[in-house]
Image (cartoon, grey):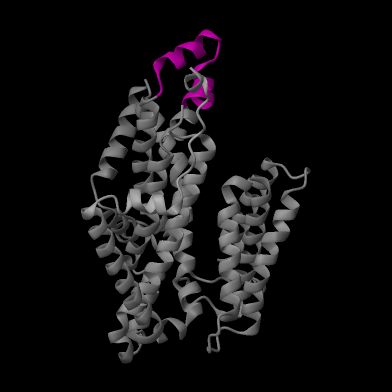
Amino acid sequence: MTASTEMLAPPTAPGPIAWLRKNLFGDMFNALLTILSLTVILFGSLAILKWVFIGADWRPVTGAPLLYLIGQYPRDQIWRLALSLLLLTFLIGLSWGVWEKFVKAFAIFLGLLLGVLAIIPLETPTVTLGVRAVFLANPLLIYLGYRIGRLQLVKSQHVVTLWLLVTAVIVLALLPGFDSNPLLPRVPTTAWGGLLVTLLLAVGGIVLSFPIGVLLALGRRSSLPVVKVFSILFIEVVRGVPLITILFMFSIILALFLPAESRIDRVIRALIGIVVFSAAYTAENVRGGLQAIPQGQVEAAKAVGLNNFQITALIVLPQAIRMVIPSIVGQFISLFKDTTLVVIVGINDLLGIGKAVLNSDPQFVSLQAEVYVFIAAIFWIFSYYMSYASRLLEKALGVGER
């Protein structure tokens, strides 16, 4: 009787030995598989580290680091890029202070990365003391922006407005410049290259394709025949052809039909092609979320007097986007990697610069592995942090939870 009425003690968490025994050495087969896997990982890691620090020849990468970052952008106008970077890092710090859960990891990572770039010992004339000072100032600006963002006076709408204004100034004025302007002379996009072009195409494609994709998804479900047919044709035609075909169409074929005085810049043409391609896939992702919303919520919203626009904007669309965040982010990561296809139409993005460096010196022909590993590492870092930010956003919004 006493034993039956006695309260049971809560179970204790297993220690590391118990966890290893349960998950890695539960039986003979698991133990052998664990030992074999650890052996392969150990020797593989040692071989990779030996190649990276001893066997690899990194001269194609360390010889021209600015070339990978900005391409042939005039070195006497590099202050415009430096100012753009300083403005963006300050805004990232400001965003960290306002939206701490979503931007914290990226802001800290970016600050550490730029700080490391400032102190890496590279013996090259292009990496001057001024360039290192610019890189070193960015972590300080991120922290300064964070402290300002924590003030109660700074609101989300202020940060959004600043992002729009600063981005417009950078993209429309600082980077391209103006004709017959001695302070900001025109820099043609043929001189742009490297990571600058890659990020411009990726960020521009993501930002512009998302609202277009949402409108196409809503248009495909519209009751207006013209809007519905146009949306269906747009989505199915674009999704039925590869991205390289669309890039060729906008970069080469479109230019042939336009008069010489009204031809669109080639980077803009490539960006339009990327936006069109990504918008079609984003539309299908959003449409899947729209179909998952129960019809009862729409009927309940109508019962309380909401009109169709209010139902879509305030009830249906936010829930639909919340449901498909993983697939949308996956599409954006794929878009970021697909920007390397622009090298086929003559745009020197990060991959194009790497190929140009390899072709610039006969000694570099046998060093392709080093260049492509370096480029792959950059793409992996950005892709991983996009995925990590997506997981943080999903956790904050409770995606997958009831």
Is 133 one of the magenta-colored residues? no
Residue 168: x %, y % from top left: 60, 54
Instruction: List x then y, in percent, for residue 36.
Output: 25, 64
- Which quadrant of the figure has residue 194? bottom left
Which is more toward the observer, 318 or 12?
12
Is residue 69 in view?
yes
Q: Residue at x 41, y 29 (%)?
A: 218
In which quarter of the view is residue 229 placed?
top left
> x%, y% of residue 152?
78, 43
95 lies left or right of 380? right
Residue 177 visible from this viewpoint: no
Looking at the magenta stretch, what is its main secondary structure?
Answer: helix
Q: Position of residue 362 (x, y in %)?
A: 30, 91
Residue 311: say if magenta: yes
Front in this rendered view, residue 255 or 110: 110
Work out whether residue 173 or residue 195 is closer to the camera in this orientation and state it: 195
Tell me where the magenta segment starts and ends, as one range. 293-316
Q: Is residue 42 above or below residue 383?
A: below
Q: Residue at x 50, y 30 (%)?
A: 318
Q: As rendered, which of 300 and 168 lies closer to the eye?
A: 300
Q: Above or below — where is 393 with respect to 221?
A: below
> Taking 28 as reference, is 290 left or right?
right
Q: Is residue 122 above or below residue 206?
A: below
Q: In this view, which residue lies farthest toward the bottom?
A: 363
How many discs appear?
Answer: 0
What residue is shown at x 41% (from left), y 36% (from top)?
A: 324
Q: Residue furthest front?
A: 1
Asked if residue 292 lies left or right of residue 37, the reply is right
Q: Residue furthest top?
A: 303
